[in-house]
Amino acid sequence: METEKLYYQDCHLHDFHAQVLSCVQKEKFWEIVLDRTAFYPEGGGQASDVGTLGDVHVLHASEEGAQVVHLCDGPLMVGQAVHGQIDYAHRFDLMQQHTGEHIVSGLIYAKYGCHNTGFHMGADVITIDFDGEIPASDLPELERQANDAVWKNIPLKIWVPSPEELPGVTYRTKRALPWPVRIVQVPGYDSCACCGVHVASTGEVGLIKLLSCIRFRSGVRMEMICGKRALDYLSRAYEQNLLVSRAFSAKLMETGAAAQKMNETVDELKFKIAGLQQQIFEDIAADCQDVGDVLIFAQDLDSGNVRKLADLAAERCGGTAAVLSGSNSAGYHYCLVTRNGDLRSFVKEMNGALDGRGGGKPQFQQGSLRASREAVTAFFHGFTCR
């Protein structure tokens, strides 16, 4: 027996009464078929509805032939009359996203001739793949036109043309479709073959926000959100910008310029710090002139600067320069450099004695170790400590 699809008759229907036709247990769940349902089954890029049938929860709905199968967490009696209740907030969110996607895809098809080749309605954003180029710089104008369609509050036209009428109907599709074909039209913006559930009028979409457009395969991938999702996203973005505004003591609409100015200031300071650090390294290296093997403990250096100081010291000391930076609790970065000889056997012994790991070339060894400063100093007993 075919399931009567109430979701196509009234997209806003959120509760209904039906009769249970079958109930089959599948592992820990039950598959229930009704004579009629408002639960939209997953399809066309749109997730299924969720909700309740009496006292059991509907976790998913799928279409199998002419019937809609409800995956539930409990059983119902065959022949039982049951009250169904869909999660309307979930349904309305999906309708907002889907209709918004149609508006945007229709605009893109009209302007660029690009086909929608992939569509995923995720929990956070909608992802759409197009088979052609869409300049990211065009997104603001596309977004404006899409929201114009929303604000015009255009009633959607959804119908199944007769076999005779169908050849004369223009609609977007990736391939030839056999009759029956369900057409979803946003008059003036889009006409598309679609099995999904949509809002009654474009005004219900509320808001369309285009987030990104990047190259993907032979075309582009676009991310967007609509309705309450878009409002929530922009509210969170506003809250974050408010924090930035306070941190920079800048007006809300001037935080970008303030951030750019801060970046320039930070870059200048980094340049100055690098120059001062280089001078300090050269002074430390000069203090190692002709002392032979030298052990240097330096504060707060990353592995790159540990290597730089070791290299400068090796130029002056006439032996091996060992530089370490860190602490007893966190461990130490180390770098050993010599202009003559082979450090590999020495560092292998050091790693074993001081719980270290690392290696490198014969005259350059770098790594980390976990030992106290006292233990390190004791191991390097023949070195001059700086």
Image (cartoon, rainbow, N blue to C red):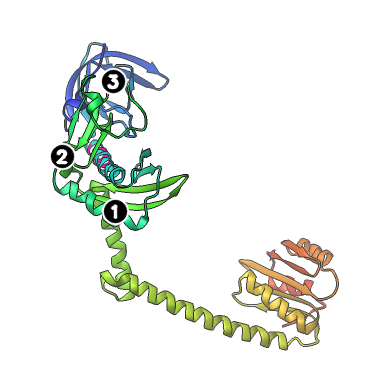
Please, what secondary structure does the residue beneath circle 3 have? loop
Q: Quadrant of residue 156?
A: top left
Which residue appears at 38% of the width and 52% of the height? Answer: 213
Residue at position x 70%, y 65% from top?
Answer: 367
Could you say which is closer to the camera, residue 287 or residue 49?
A: 49
Instruction: Give the residue type at disc 1.
Output: Tyr
Query: Mark 2 is on which residue type?
Result: Ser
Tally of marks:
3
Q: Nearer the viewer, residue 139 or 199?
A: 139
Measured along the vertical axis of the image, is residue 88 above or below residue 375? above
Residue on which the image places disc 3: 179
Comes first in the chain, label 2 or label 3: 3
Q: Mark 2 points at which residue?
A: 201
Distance, label 2 to label 3, CA atoms, is: 26 Å
Q: Nearer the viewer, mark 2 or mark 3?
A: 3
Image vertical order of residue 140 relative to residue 244, above or below: above
Q: Bounds of the magenta span?
A: 92-97
Q: In this view, does 366 lie to the left or right of 205?
A: right
Local SS, label 2: loop
Mark 3 residue type? Trp
Q: Position of residue 366 (x, y in %)?
A: 72, 67
Q: Splitting the image into 4 quarters, where does residue 118 fall?
A: top left
Mark in front: 3 vs 1 = 3
Q: Is mark 1 on a helix, strand or loop?
A: helix
Q: Which residue lies furthest to the front in this view?
A: 168
